[in-house]
């Protein structure tokens, strides 16, 4: 079997980077000297990102069709790497003060990313599952990283058990699909279905696939784990879980549902629309009652999953474009918000919204970034979130108008709970007026996310065009 | 429908297999009751003290590491069999594989997983 | 450098934006550093703008073929907006002028605002203000221009209300913002209509398609409506009657801001915009007449008010309104060249006079009444003499800048009248009368403030170099800036023109008339306010015609009329709507909000934190999904019977 290594450049270099960080961590004696690991990983990741961008347009399949490389995977690779870089950059302060084991932290983050990339680049179900588990297990470890913190352990345990359950369901679904369609290769499944392999077992399998992936993107009603895990996990991990794991799972959803089951579109779009609506409803409405900012952001991320699912409902070029565009801008808004949360936690030791009182005076930059990120998530023009939502909802205006109305109404509703935080930050007097000094790398992250959210809101065309090209290429390559 | 009948047959056969085995032994085994038959089977020796003891988590760490290297052999065996056909690249790949596992062992060692405390 | 400036023209507005961001987020605690950043960035902008202007004016190709490049900015099906840059002689001239005046104003402000607690912020706002105007000038697209237009409005709001502790400043800021919003609303409607009817907002494309409006199925009536709506924006922004009321109040801001607003950044935006859109107005003859009429009327109207005002900055403010009227008049009679020429010269002498007035106020600790000043020229020679230069320029004494541009406006108005527009004679009469009044009120101010006996100005001394240096530069420019547009050299109208370049013979008779009018005005002022030490004649004149005096001094009671209108009509209407709002709308909204909040509280309890519950819900959902899926797909059920 010939292996085309040029298609695997990102994956191989990520694996090497992860192992190098691991080995370095083992060689370096003192815990204090391990602080350099973050910088090292960051440099390595930047190189890998550059490599990935440079190999844009490398297309093909390798390992006998088990592994794919195309524009679509390149786009999501860039997205995952960008997210990882921003998370590491923003979390340096937090890690230095809250987490002992740098070696495990950085290498596990890198392996999680490798898992994501393998997952959405997979050409068959086995490879897909392998990537998914690499990602999930890494996240389980990361979630329970603060070993002395009860909440973190609880979150890790919950995530372990529930992810296990969902994996079981997913595997069952995959095997049913295999049984019905006679192959594990995504492309061949599409062909077989077109030839009339249609079978009720396929439907059952599909439902289970939706459940399995629905769990990963935290779409209601498979979202129950998200608030508890988001709250308990170390904040940078939460950010990466919300951004990376979710975006990668969306990529897989597109790959599987459009790649293999496009023929059966009529059957599953209605269900996805139902999931989208339920996620928007539950996410937005429950967010109202939260007093912990991480829980609130968790529910908001459930709602965001609902918005992104709308693009999948459309199941066409515009829909894919919407999903990709939104996933990308969601990276910046979410990481911006969570970086603020982790910095504030680092200084005040609290995630309560009430403790954000007067943040605008204590750390103006943090307050502004949180404001902009939240407004972007709520979809207020001229921020990126507005454009993203526009691209998503415009795709279903014709067939699912009710979904559009629901989305618009709930977006308006969401402004309420976002602005509640803003009000606390900007109106209330701080209990302790001492300025809250942000770490320099965290500030840099905040600036970057702020700039990206503003820029992509005001001038979305480059990214939109890119997403459009990728979407066209993806559908053409089916 | 014939395919499905086959599956049905296999399911039934599976149930039947276990049912027949258990049923037969139930029917033909000699019924002799004594005290020793009710004892927990512990390597042939009577237990000392209560058996519901808690194990140290370290025990599981050992077990896990053992399993990892136990399973490694599973991969090494077919490789060794077809070693001549795989050639140099096969050797390199296996070294990479073992290297990654050794890294894990190294880590476990350094974290003190191999010391009983 | 020139090549670079042409290719990177967008850097001109970007530099001040960067300095704005730097100051707000980084250097705010260090006042001196902040001002250095602002001035440095502005200097960069100015250097770029001047090499750009040099490049444009030395290369005749640009005059016919503007430099235009754009990026796709927003896009959806059937609607694309390109953001871009349009460099032609008009925008090059504006870039140069705006960046120069902004630079001088910033240098001046280092002296004027010294010791202010919000010193850094002031420079940040000034930078953003200049940036918005520069951005507006080079925009190639109306939507893009509108955004900058609104930014200009926002900055003016921030700067006019800069002294937030002063009630009058806050009120003035609100007044400026709201009044200009009225115009912006009309303008936005105009832009929307243009997009709907012509499906483009690009200036060059519009210029190409609008002359063929009839073929595109756009009626003349609609086009007229568009033009009038569009004109509302400039009317408000450029302080034309009847929306001029905000401009005189805008002097509540720090004086450098007034200089910037009146000379370079804000009010001339309206004139510039009408000039840019002249291709729209010429298609609708009626609309141009409206423009000309409003311009001529505003010119005279404001001049008559300025005659009796007592506050030094208020006189200058009305003078600006009046001069803007001139520019609009020139546009109305179809001469882009004359209008922008006057804009150009006016920028220098008006900035000069405002800054000099600021210098006076600075020395007198903000005592503003001209009747309480006198003889300042001996204590403050630089301020005084530069102001005199400004006065000569605005009055129209050759060879100072104002003479040439005003003469050009008189000339084009006269020719407009001669070409069969009966109203043109009226406009000409208005313009001529305004010229006389202008000379009179400015020299009234000069004589009262700088000449005559000294009045209790013991501690008065000349302002520091940072303030006088810009004055000197501006004085030189007020002297010579007009020379590029004399009837003999006539460079200006070959550069900037709409339609064919105007190349009339020098009209000596008109020049003579204009000089005579100016001299008459100055002479009258001299007799009433300088020669007559007690100003008896002036006082008795006011006493003799109290009605006329009060009408002028009270600014024709327009503010009072507006106040009455808002109090009685708007507030009354608002009360009715308010009742409707709190009982009906709020009832529904609050009900919905309560429902939403309640459901959030309810849903919260679903999240128990118990793993078993979560797993249960997960499996229930899988079950429901599977069943629903099978029930939903009638297809699937149909296939069930047909499985092989």
Image (cartoon, coloured by chain):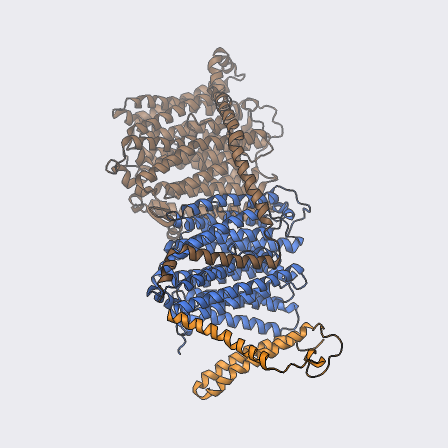
Quadrant into which the C terminus of chain A falls: bottom left
Given residues C134 and C481, the one toward you in this image is C134
The picture places residue C243, in percent across and down from the top left corner, at: 44, 27
Locate residue C149 relative to residue A215 in the image: left or right: left
Q: Quadrant of residue C206?
A: top left
Q: Residue furthest top?
A: C544
Q: Is residue A199 visible?
A: yes
Q: How many numbered marks does the figure carry?
A: 0
Residue C335, image x and y in percent?
A: 31, 32
From what the image shows, is residue A242 above or below residue C186?
Answer: below
Q: Give the residue drawn at x 51%, y 79%.
A: B96
Q: From the top left corner, tell me how far across and down residue C95 is, in percent.
A: 41, 42
The chain letter of the brown chain reads: C
Residue at the bottom extreme, as displayed: B84
At x 43% / y 87%, what residue is drawn? B85
* Above or below, comparing residue A155 to residue C209 in the picture: below
In this rendering, does residue C505 appear at all? no
Which one is nearer the viewer's eye here, A435 or C345?
A435
Work out whether residue C196 or residue A323 is closer to the camera in this orientation and state it: A323
Q: Residue at x 50, y 75 (%)?
A: B16
Left or right of residue C557: residue A193: left
Q: Front-most of A208 and A301?
A: A208
In the image, residue C616 lies at what x, y percent?
Answer: 57, 58
Colour of chain B, in one word, is orange
Q: Residue furthest right?
A: B49
Name the quadrant of the N terminus of chain A: bottom left
Q: Is residue C366 left or right of residue C516?
A: right
Chain letter for the part of the structure drawn in blue: A
- Extreme-left residue of the structure: C215
**In the figure, A236 relative to A64: above or below?**
above
């Amino acid at each position: 079997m010939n292996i085309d290594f040029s298609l695997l450049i990102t994956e191989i270099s990520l694996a090497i980077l992860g192992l190098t960080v691991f080995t370095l961590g083992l060689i370096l004696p003192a815990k204090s000297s391990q602080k350099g690991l973050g910088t090292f990983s960051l440099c390595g990741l930047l190189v890998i990102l550059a490599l990935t961008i440079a190999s844009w347009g490398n297309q093909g399949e390798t390992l006998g069709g088990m592994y794919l490389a195309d524009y679509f995977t390149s786009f999501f690779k860039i997205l995952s790497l960008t997210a990882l870089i921003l998370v590491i950059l923003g979390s340096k302060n937090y890690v230095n003060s809250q987490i002992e084991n740098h070696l495990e932290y950085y290498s596990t983050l890198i392996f999680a990313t490798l898992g994501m990339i393998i997952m959405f680049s997979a050409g068959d179900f086995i490879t897909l599952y392998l990537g998914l588990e690499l990602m999930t297990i890494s996240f389980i470890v990361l979630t329970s990283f603060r070993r002395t913190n009860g909440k973190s352990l609880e979150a890790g345990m919950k995530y372990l058990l529930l992810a296990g359950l969902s994996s079981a369901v997913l595997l069952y679904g995959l095997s049913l699909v295999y049984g019905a369609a006679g192959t594990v290769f995504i492309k061949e499944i599409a062909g077989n279905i077109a030839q009339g392999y249609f079978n009720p077992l396929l439907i059952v399998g599909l439902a289970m696939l939706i459940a399995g992936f629905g769990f990963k993107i935290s779409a209601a009603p498979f979202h129950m784990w998200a608030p508890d895990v988001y709250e308990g996990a170390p904040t940078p991990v939460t950010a990466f879980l919300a951004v990376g794991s979710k975006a990668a799972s969306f990529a897989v959803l597109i790959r599987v549902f459009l790649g293999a089951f496009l023929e059966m579109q009529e059957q599953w779009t209605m269900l996805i629309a139902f999931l989208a609506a339920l996620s928007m409803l539950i996410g937005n409405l429950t967010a109202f009652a939260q007093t912990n900012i991480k829980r609130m952001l968790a529910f908001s991320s459930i709602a965001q999953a609902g918005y992104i699912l709308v693009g999948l409902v459309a199941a066409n070029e515009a829909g894919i474009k919407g999903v990709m565009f939104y996933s990308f801008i969601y990276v910046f808004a979410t990481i911006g918000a969570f970086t603020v949360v982790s910095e504030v936690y680092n200084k005040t030791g609290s995630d309560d919204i009430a403790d954000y009182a007067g943040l605008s005076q204590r750390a103006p930059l943090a307050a502004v970034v949180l404001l902009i990120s939240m407004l972007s998530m709520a979809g207020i023009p001229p921020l990126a979130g507005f454009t993203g939502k526009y691209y998503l909802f415009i795709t279903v205006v014709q067939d699912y108008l009710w979904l559009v109305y629901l989305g618009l109404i709930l977006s308006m509703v969401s402004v309420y709970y976002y602005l509640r935080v803003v009000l606390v930050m900007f109106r209330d007097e701080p209990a302790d007026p001492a300025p809250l000094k942000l770490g320099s790398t965290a500030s840099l992250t905040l600036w970057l996310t702020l700039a990206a959210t503003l820029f992509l809101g005001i001038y979305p065309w480059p990214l939109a065009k890119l997403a459009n090209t990728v979407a066209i290429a993806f559908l053409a390559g089916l | 429908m014939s395919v499905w009948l086959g599956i049905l047959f296999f399911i039934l056969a599976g149930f039947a297999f276990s049912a027949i085995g258990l049923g037969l032994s139930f029917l033909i085994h000699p019924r002799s009751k004594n005290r020793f038959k009710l004892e927990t089977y512990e390597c042939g020796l009577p237990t000392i003290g209560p058996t519901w003891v808690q194990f140290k988590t370290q025990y599981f760490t050992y077990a896990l590491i053992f399993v990892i290297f136990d399973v490694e052999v599973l991969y090494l065996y077919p490789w060794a069999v077809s070693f001549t056909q795989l050639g140099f690249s096969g050797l390199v790949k296996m070294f990479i594989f073992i290297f990654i596992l050794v890294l894990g062992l190294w880590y476990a060692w350094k974290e003190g997983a191999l010391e009983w405390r | 450098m020139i090549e670079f400036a042409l290719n990177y023209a967008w850097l001109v507005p970007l530099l001040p934006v960067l300095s704005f961001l730097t100051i707000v987020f980084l250097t705010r605690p260090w006042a001196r550093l902040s001002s250095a950043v602002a001035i440095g960035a502005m200097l960069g902008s100015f250097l770029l703008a001047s090499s750009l202007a040099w490049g444009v004016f030395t290369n005749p190709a640009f005059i016919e073929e503007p430099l235009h490049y754009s990026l796709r900015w927003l896009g959806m099906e059937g609607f694309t907006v390109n953001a871009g840059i349009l460099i032609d002689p008009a925008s090059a001239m504006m870039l140069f002028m705006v960046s120069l005046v902004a630079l001088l104003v910033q240098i001046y402000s280092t002296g004027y605002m010294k010791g202010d607690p919000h010193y850094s912020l002031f420079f940040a706002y000034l930078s953003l203000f200049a940036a918005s105007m520069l951005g507006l000038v080079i925009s190639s697209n109306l939507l893009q221009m509108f955004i900058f237009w609104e930014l200009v409005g926002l900055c003016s709001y921030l700067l006019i209300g800069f002294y937030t502790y002063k009630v009058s400043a806050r009120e003035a800021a609100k007044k400026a913002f709201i009044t200009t919003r009225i115009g912006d609303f009309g303008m936005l409607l105009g832009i929307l209509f243009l997009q709907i009817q012509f499906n483009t907002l690009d200036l060059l494309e519009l210029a190409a398609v609008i002359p063929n409006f009839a073929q595109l199925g756009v009626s003349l009536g609609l086009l007229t409506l568009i033009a009038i709506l569009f004109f509302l924006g400039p009317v408000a922004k450029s302080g034309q009657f009847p929306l001029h009321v905000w401009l005189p109040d805008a002097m509540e801001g720090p004086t450098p801001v007034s200089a910037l607003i009146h000379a370079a950044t804000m009010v001339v935006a309206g004139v510039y915009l009408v000039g840019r859109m002249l291709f729209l107005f010429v298609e609708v003859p009626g609309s141009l007449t409206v423009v000309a009429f409003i311009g001529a009327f505003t010119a005279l109207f404001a001049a008559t008010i300025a005659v009796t005002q007592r506050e030094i900055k208020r006189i200058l403010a009305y003078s600006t309104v009046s001069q803007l009227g001139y520019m609009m008049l020139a546009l109305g009679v179809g001469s882009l060249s004359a209008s922008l020429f006057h804009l150009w010269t006016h920028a220098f002498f008006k900035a000069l006079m405002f800054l000099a007035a600021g210098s006076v106020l600075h020395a007198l600790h903000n005592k503003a009444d001209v009747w309480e000043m006198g003889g300042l020229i001996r204590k403050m020679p630089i301020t005084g003499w530069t102001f005199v230069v400004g006065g000569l320029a605005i009055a129209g004494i050759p060879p100072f800048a104002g003479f040439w541009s005003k003469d050009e406006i008189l000339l084009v108005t006269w020719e407009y009248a001669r070409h069969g527009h009966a109203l043109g004679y009226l406009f000409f009469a208005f313009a001529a009368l305004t010229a006389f009044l202008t000379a009179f009120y400015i020299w009234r101010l000069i004589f009262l403030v700088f000449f005559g006996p000294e009045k209790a100005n013991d501690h008065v001394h000349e302002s520091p170099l940072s303030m006088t240096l810009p004055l000197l530069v501006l004085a030189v420019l007020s002297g010579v800036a007009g020379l590029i547009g004399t009837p003999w050299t006539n460079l200006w109208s070959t550069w900037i023109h709409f339609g064919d370049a105007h190349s009339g013979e020098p009209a000596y008779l008109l020049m003579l008339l204009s000089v005579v009018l100016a001299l008459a005005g100055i002479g009258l002022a001299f007799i009433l306010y300088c020669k007559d030490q007690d100003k008896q004649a002036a006082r008795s004149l006011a006493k003799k015609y109290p009605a006329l005096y009060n009408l002028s001094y009270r600014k024709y009671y327009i503010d009072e009329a507006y106040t009455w209108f808002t109090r009685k009509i708007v507030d009354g209407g608002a009360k009715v709507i308010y009742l409707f709002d709190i009982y009906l709308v709020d009832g529904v909204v609050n009900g919905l909000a309560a429902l939403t909040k309640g459901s959030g509280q309810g849903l919260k309890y679903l999240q128990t934190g118990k793993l078993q519950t979560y797993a249960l819900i997960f499996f229930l959902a899988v079950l429901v999904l599977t069943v629903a899926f099978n029930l939903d797909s009638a297809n699937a059920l149909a296939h069930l019977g047909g499985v092989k």
